[in-house]
Amino acid sequence: MATLLHLDSAVFPQGSASREVTAAFVAAWHEQHPDGQVVYRDLAANPLPHLDAPAVIAGAEDALRGELAAELAAADAVLIGAPMYNFSIPSTLKAWLDQVIIIGHTAGPEGSVAGTPITVVASRGGSYAPGTPREDFEFVQNYLEKVLTGMLGAEVDFIVPELTLAHSKPEMAELIPLAEASRTQALSDAAEKAKALATRLAA
């Protein structure tokens, strides 16, 4: 029985593009692997404290850091909802990363998370794809790819629903068809990736 660790970090519980796609992923995971377990953390509803000096010194011996690190290490796969806020990730997600990245424990070549598949739903209100005017403002995928692979040694995959503000901003109205296409593709990708991952881990 495989375990999926599911993290959401979008501020709004309703109307969130990243939450919609992570929910589709989890639904497909359950459909493909009904005996699988899902451990869920809503980092917006229940934010973690920022890392402080005593916790850094204690490392995995700190009660909270030890709990979070064990939860991550026990997961066969991880799903992260990471909407773009002010060109980067939500501070609640950064707090989780700071708590769980422990050198010599979860992090490093022999870390407990090495090789774990992590799927990140990186939603954004506009487009920051290569070749777009705001390409240089993309600090979600760039950052998470580096920290999750470079420090944790994880296997990282991204699903990117973009132009999510097209329906609410009049100046983006002409982009609505592209936004809908991106949403449809993201939901399809989530279902396909979840089923493939569940099949792989249940084998």
Image (spheres, grey):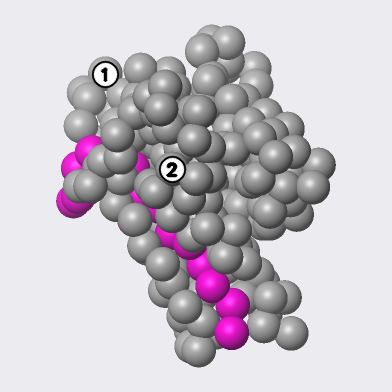
Density class for disc 2 (Cα within 10 Å; few <14, some 14-19, many ≥20) is some
| Amino acid type at mark 2 | Asp
- Image point 53% across, 20% down: which residue? 139
Residue 79, image x and y in percent? 50, 55
**Is there any visible trace of residue 46 in the rendered image?**
yes
Q: Which residue is mark 1?
A: 171
x then y, percent, for residue 183: 43, 49
Q: Amino acid at mark 1?
A: Glu
- The image position of residue 81, as x and y in percent, is 42, 47
Q: Which stretch appears magenta? A: 1-21
Residue 108, quarter of the rendered image: top right
Query: In this orientation, does residue 161 appear?
Result: no
C-alpha gap between disc 2 and disc 1 = 49 Å
Up/down of 138 relative to 200, above or below: above
Magenta-span inclusion, residue 111 = no
Q: Name the quadrant of the N terminus.
A: bottom right
- As helix, strand or loop, the secondary structure at mark 1 comes to helix
Residue under label 2 = 62
Instruction: State the SS at label 2.
Output: loop
